[in-house]
Amino acid sequence: CNLVGGQDELVFDGRSMFADSTGRIVAEAKAFDEDLLMADVIGLNNQIQIKPTRPSSVVSRPSSLDEVYQALVLGTRDYARKNGFRKTLLGLSGGIDSSVVAAIAVAALGAENVTGVTMPSKFNSPETKSDAVKLAKNLGIELLTIPIEPLLERFNGALQSVPGWNSKGIAYENLQARIRGGILMTLSNQFGSLVLTTGNKSETAVGYATLYGDTAGGFAVIKDVPKTLVYTLAEHINQLSGREIIPADVITRAPSAELREGQKDSDSLPAYDLLDKILKGYVEEDKSARQLIDAGLPKETVYNVIRMVDRNEYKRRLSPPGIKITPKAFGKDRRLPITNHYSLSSQR
């Protein structure tokens, strides 16, 4: 008899089963769902026979991709419900991560219990703003539009008197994320909704996130999902629905934080397929820099990625809990010191 349901980062998949004396599975309960499975156990000439009480024998197993999707849905549903949250909200940027998280939230809790909040600035393209609206319509969720430009200008104006303040620098870019995070947490405070963050494992690993900005929230649905898998999940969600839930442009567009003019993720990070290979080796398989390089991965990129992973442990400590779906997730699976740290990147 197996446990089923979500418990903080962990999701238990159910699938309790009966096996006969030869070890053959003769009946299996549903995966990622509560199920009642009964069988008659009959002794005959010192042989044990097990006869399921329902016609079906072994329930067909979901694919590995569908298992990930079902785990994310169940983990989100149970975290919200078991902690007393009936409704959730999240920022909708028109990007791939928030689109996938919104679709998972709807599958977990119902469209009536999910609110999307789009918070555009002058750096958001017409395409991403339009895609956020399309996604909300496709999912049937409420969409709030709260432009951050007036708040951004007020903050920027107040900071002009600070010596050295740079309204074109990284602090100005991160200020936008922090304004958005503040809006979401204020709405959560007002309406009692659980804020879902939308950062993926690839970005969490290298610190491509803003503390108290896009990390502000109560539950990180795709915290352990690599970016390349996020794209695959988006296509899977559309296939399951039999229609375009996540707009095609969201899946094909080059990812961007849109915190400055013309910004793309590739300005700061390697291509995600390469980044995820390095992260899988370093984080999940405990491989050294030398082992990764010997496997054919580019030397300088390996060292740069490892340096980013090592120096961003403090950011990960300040992030909300999220669902574990890989062999090794950040948090309980991988606990490293912040102050007395060490780095494999020095092993050349």
Image (tube, rainbow, N blue to C red):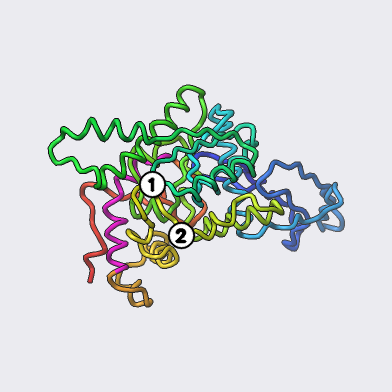
Q: In this view, does 140 lie above or below 253?
A: above
Out of 98 and 104, give the one closest to the viewer: 98
- Toward which corner of the image does residue 81 lie, by quadrant? top right
Image coordinates for residue 337, horizontal then vertical, percent: 27, 48
Three-letter residue code for mark 1: Phe
Q: Which residue lies furthest to the left in this view?
A: 163
Q: Determine the CA span between mark 1 and mark 2.
A: 15 Å
Residue located at (53% from left, 39% from top): 7
Q: How many marks?
A: 2
Q: Is residue 237 left or right of residue 169?
A: right
| Segment colored magenta | 301-320
Residue located at (50% from left, 36% from top): 117
Q: In this view, does 246 lie to the left or right of 310?
A: right
Out of 338 and 257, give the one closest to the viewer: 257
Three-letter residue code for mark 2: Ala
Instruction: Say if residue 97 shows up in the picture.
Output: no
Instruction: Say if residue 121 shows up in the picture.
Output: yes
Image coordinates for residue 124, horizontal then vertical, percent: 42, 46
Q: Magenta residues: mostly which secondary structure?
A: helix
* Mark 1 crowd level (few <14, some 14–19, many ≥20, 10 Å Cα): some
Say if the magenta span includes residue 305. yes
Disc on res. 123: 1
Q: Is residue 83 above or below residue 76?
A: above
Q: Is residue 243 above or below residue 198?
A: below
Out of 139 and 76, give the one closest to the viewer: 139
Sequence-wise, which precedes: disc 1 or disc 2? 1
Disc on res. 254: 2
Label 1 secondary element: loop
- Toward which corner of the image does residue 77 lie, by quadrant? top right
Residue located at (55% from left, 56% from top): 249
> Quick one: quadrant of the C terminus?
bottom left
